[in-house]
Image: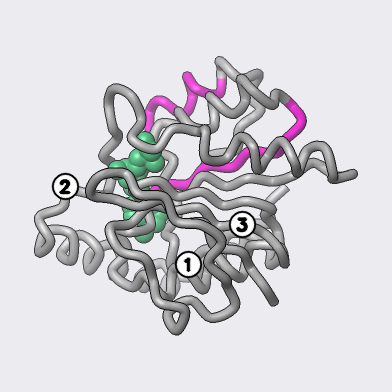
Amino acid sequence: MPTLKKLDSVERNKIADQLRRGRTHDQKRNWGTSYSSGIKGPSLFPIHDVVPILNKLVESKKTKPRILDLGCTEGRCLKELFGVFGNKLEYHGMSLARFNEWKKTNSETNNYLNFRVGHAEALGNYFKKNHFDVIRSSLAIAHSNNLAKAIQEVRKVLKKGGLFIFSDDRVPTQKEIPGFSILDVQHFGFSKSIILKKIN
Ligand SMILES: C[S@@+](CC[C@H](N)C(=O)[O-])C[C@H]1O[C@@H](n2cnc3c(N)ncnc32)[C@H](O)[C@@H]1O
């Protein structure tokens, strides 16, 4: 289970400032609000991108693989994954705002999912280092106003060899993602699904 570090007022103010700057950044790009928006209807990036990866992990690992859905909104992706893997995985979801649907989603999954509010750029404050096998972020981390920093926070809490699968409209250069290699890029219209592997 994640270890929560109690945040002092300086850290809380820093995160609040990141939230404000993130929203301004989104407004400048004419992106919809990233704070509490969910997406209705079929998911643009369905879970098929992670299912084969998780299948391999479940088969090869002695311990339960841990997945984080970063920017999980109401928890739809985690619920779908629970439908496939049941209690063979440990599931975590995080968003910038608390979603009323989290309670309902959890009641439909034997209360097996862990949800929390948090900011991608402060991931290391919420979870232990080297904690997750897979982190997925569909239409979420790209909202960050400091993507390079957010990706390095992802790296902190990802295990060595762990995978980060995220969508953005641009593939980062190798210089922007030290400690990762690019495993795969798939194109979906205006956006891309990018798979990074933590290499050291
Ligand atoms: C467009 S929705 C994501 C949709 C969802 N992942 C899906 O595939 O249906 C954006 C979500 O990302 C979260 N988000 C945006 N920026 C974030 C950040 N910097 N850190 C954590 N969550 C963030 C928002 O709170 C929101 O829940």
Image quarter for residue 130?
bottom right
Instruction: Check disc 2: other Cα within 10 Å, few if <14, some if 14-19, many if 20+.
Output: few
**Of marks 2 and 3, the one in the foreground:** 3
Q: Residue at x 82, y 37 (%)?
A: 59
Mark 1 vs mark 3, CA separation in Å: 19 Å
Distance from mark 2 CB to nearest ligand 1 atom below 8 Å: yes
Question: Can you identify the residue that label 2 sits on?
Answer: 32
Mark 1 vs mark 2, CA separation in Å: 22 Å
Q: Say which amino acid is labelled 1.
A: Ala
Q: Is residue 197 above or below residue 95?
A: below
Instruction: Check disc 3: other Cα within 10 Å, few if <14, some if 14-19, many if 20+.
Output: many
Q: Which mark is residue 122?
A: 1
Image location of residue 11, percent across then percent down: 44, 72
Question: Can you identify the residue that label 3 sits on?
Answer: 163
Query: In screen coordinates, is 83 left or right of 20?
Result: right
Residue placed furthest toward the bottom:
175
Mark 2 vs mark 3, CA separation in Å: 27 Å
Instruction: Check disc 1: other Cα within 10 Å, few if <14, some if 14-19, many if 20+.
Output: some
Image location of residue 57, percent across then percent down: 76, 44
In magenta, the rendered stretch is 87-106
Q: Say which amino acid is labelled 3.
A: Leu
Mark sitting earlier along the chain (2/3): 2
Q: Is residue 11 above or below residue 166?
A: below
Front residue (pair 167, 16): 167
Q: Say which amino acid is labelled 2.
A: Gly
**Of marks 1 and 2, the one in the foreground:** 2
Mark sitting earlier along the chain (1/3): 1
Q: Is residue 125 above or below residue 88?
A: below
Q: Residue at x 63, y 59 (%)?
A: 127
